[in-house]
Image: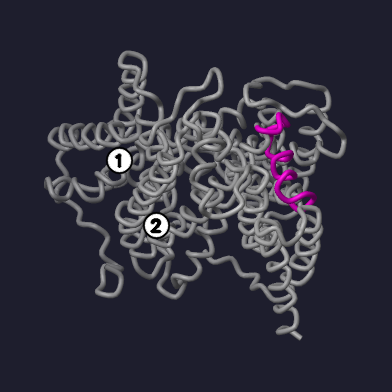
Amino acid sequence: MASRPPVSITERLDAINEFDREPVSKDALQGPGNFIGLYAGEHVAGTEFVIGPLFVAHGVAAGDLFLGLLVGNLLAVLSWAFICAPIATRTRLNLYWKLRKIAGPNLLFVYNLVNAAMFCFLAGSMISVAATAVGIPFDMTMPGLDDLYPNSVGWVVTVLLVGSVVTILAILGFEKIAYFSKIAAPWMFLVFVACGVAVLPQLGVTSMDDFWTVANEKIWTGEPLSGRVRFTFWHVMFFAWFANMAMHIGMADMTILRYAKKWHYGFASAFGMYLGHYVAWVASGILVALALQNASEVAPGPIAYLGAGVAGLVAVLLAGWTTANPTIYRAGLAMQTITPNWKRWKVTLAVGMITTMAALFPALMMRLLDFVALYGLLLMPMGAVIFADFWLLPKLGLRQDYAEWKQLLFSLPAALAWLLTLGACLLLNLVWNVEIFFLGLPGWFIATGLYVGLSLIQQQRNPAPQAALPNTDFLTEENI
Amino acid sequence: MKTALKLASFLGLGLTVVPAFLVFAGTITWTTHATMMALGAVLWFVTAPFWMPRDAPV
């Protein structure tokens, strides 16, 4: 007999997370090597070909870049290690189930929609990156750093072609592409290194002694391109820290780190940060400086070709494709809550079409710094809610996972903490001109304070019989 | 056999990155470096799938 299709939002969400409701079992826990490989692979991606050049376009000075990346990436690693990993290894739950307990299924539904939209745009930027490599043999007019809209028929056709192929391959098999992505990762990192090193002589670096002088005079000059805000040490530091804000203080990586035997495997993120968000950003910055010096095109495909020829083009194509694939998959998972009766391929097709439409706009790629900052900021407050619910509420004698205990479909404290935090950040931006890169830090404290305060009010009105303690199933000597 | 494949893979990685330093040192031209990188890519992608573990880490 056929089972009844899920109808309510709660049932829809639960149906697609059938195997993730329980904490990870002890025999499924993984050693540190897996996390090192995972983080190193995930953060050497197609978008690194864009972020490094955008720092150059924003006129960051060499000293600010190197120091800003050093400190910012360190703060990102510490955020993974001290904020995300301890909760992940104590609860052994993914973000979805933890948030469902705290925020209720209906608020989680809204969160998933926002998440799906952000994933579509992120995957769109990766398809744009891949298209810049495919277009080179056809002499396509490349988008410039200031292009926001499609700039040629060739661009539109190429993006539609790349988007279609990426979508079809994602439909045919996500796992196979994930494996291919794993194979490509070490090679891709070396391509970044090789690209950066090989073009140094063309910039006038003939020995290591020349590097710093050329870096200051020709690469990270401190002079922004017209129409760009000049980046300081603080911009670089905060951008590097919050480039993956949704993953660390936003808690999305609970989904990964719940498999870690010990909380300090969160430090494995250092391999992603310092290989991808340091070496690769520096290398792609060197490439774009050469492109600007030669007055040639600055899109990812052309600059990679400058550094490594055909291998560079292949790297850009693969980097864009292999990172768009899991992003489309994640967006599909989130989208499935709206269309529970659709087959998996239909959801992937719909996501692929939205993503491809988004990719037509070079703005996503050329304004990637702003988009990445916005993406993290939108999702971060829910990470602060999880943090506050896990650590702070028990200390105040309040119940954790109140929505689950009270069987609420919608947690008002979590919803208000989310919305009011974003409102406060908007206010900071509009009234005090605080740039988007700096909003994450005050935003996190605002969200935490709001959630604690609102939970206090809620639970004083409807007191729980006892405050729940943290899930201590795995709170053993070996993992704390 | 597996050892030979691994050696070929690492040779592919070597061909990917070492020539760049030789260009920097002025030992080879950029064109040679680009050709060697292309060869390295082929070598890596043809051999690595035969020995890299398939199971996803998490």
Residue A348 is at least partly visible in this image: yes
Task: Identify the element where label 1 is drawn.
Answer: helix
Q: Which residue is mark 2?
A: A93
Front position in the image: A388 or A6 = A388
Residue at screen point 46% across, 58% down: A256
Residue at screen point 43% across, 42% down: A240
Residue at screen point 75% across, 37% down: A131
Instruction: Tell me where residue A436 appears, x and y as whole percent.
Output: 40, 27
- In the image, is residue A199 above or below residue A119? below
Q: Is residue A126 left or right of residue A40?
A: right
Mark 1 vs mark 2: tell me if same chain.
Answer: yes
Instruction: Tell me where residue B26 appears, x and y as whole percent.
Output: 70, 58
Callout 1 touching callout 2 (CB < 8 Å) = no
Residue A250 sits inside the magenta stretch: no
Instruction: Tell me where residue A75 appears, x and y as whole percent.
Output: 34, 48
Instruction: Please rate how many residues cluster around mark 1, counting C-alpha atoms within 10 Å: few if below 14, some from 14 to 19, many from 20.
Output: many
Q: Is residue A107 left or right of residue A34?
A: left
Residue A306 sits inside the magenta stretch: yes
Q: Which residue is mark 1?
A: A385
- In the image, is residue A31 above or below residue A21? below
Sequence-first disc among 1 and 2: 2
Q: Nearer the viewer, mark 1 or mark 2?
A: 1
Q: Amino acid at mark 2?
A: Leu
Q: Amino acid at mark 1?
A: Val
Separation (CA) of disc 1 from disc 2: 15 Å
Front position in the image: A402 or B2 = B2
What segment is highlighted magenta in the picture? A293-311
Q: Tell me, what colour scheme is on the image?
A: one colour
